[in-house]
Image (cartoon, helix red, strand yellow):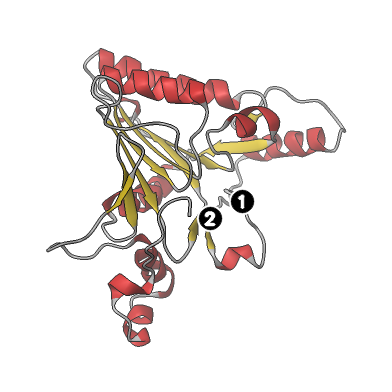
Amino acid sequence: GSGNYNSKTARIYTDIGLFTSSPSIGADLSDLFNALTGFSRQDLYRKLLVAPGSMRRRIHELIDRETTLAEAGRGGRIIAKMNALVDADTIEALYRASQAGVEIDLIVRGICCLRPGVPGVSDHIRVISIVGRFLEHSRIFYFGNDGKEEYYFGSADWMPRNFDRRVEAVTPVDDTTLHPRLKSLLATCLADNRQAWELAADGSYVQRVPGDQPVRATHVALLQHSWGEHVVAESGARPDTVASSRRSPGS
């Protein structure tokens, strides 16, 4: 999962988890916990991207694959959702992907050292932060892979401490019946026009406003999905105010 199996933070954090009977993932988790307890040393895993170890390399391989596809005229698509984007090498890889024509959407709740929309550098990169009733905590990574879509999620942000100094795990979501749910979650975040703040090339944030368009607030959508639309209706509150916030990212 993406973290916070905790009775207190679970009330205010958004996270996702995977229940699976996959023998490969189960064996990887056994190996990982054996390594954590000192029972064994494990460097190679069947499915999991584990840090410190293979995670940084594999994430860069996935980004570079989209770059290669774009350079060959076959498009390229990356959507990544995380708490923070700080790692310089990963940012450079994203810049190279953008310059090759890969369309990149980043949903970064907190600190983001990448600058989107810089001419000749990051023209094809867009960054938003969603700030509302709940603390966005899930990390989800999508790669178009020339139509053979791949989804990953787990505990790691794209930061040196996560790649190099912490034990983290990211799992591929191989069950394609789960892809529509992840796709819908990412699409809901990207379409947010109430709780989303857009990062500009100069490092400033501007909050999206719905204007004449229907209000689309991520956390309202999550509540409606989890509890049913009657929750918002019975509360007597307007959907655009149930989970709104005027705080800026990082505040």
> Does residue 244 sit above or below 65 in this rendering?
below
Q: Give the residue type at disc 1.
A: Gly
Residue 142 x %, y %: 40, 36
Identify which residue is drawn at 62% across, 63% down.
9
Q: Give the vertical position of 53 relative to 230 (above or below).
A: above
Which of the 4 image quarters holds residue 236?
bottom left
Please tell me whether residue 172 is drawn above or below residue 182 in the rendered image.
above
Identify the residue shown where x is 48% and y is 55%: 251
Going by the numbered disc 2, the residue's amino acid type is Asp
Q: Is residue 221 left or right of residue 136?
A: left
Q: Which residue is mark 2?
A: 15
> In screen coordinates, is 39 left or right of 241?
right
**Observer-nearest of 145 and 83:** 83
Q: Dot 2: what SS?
A: loop
Is residue 101 rendered to the left or right of residue 158? left
**Mark 1: which secondary structure?**
loop
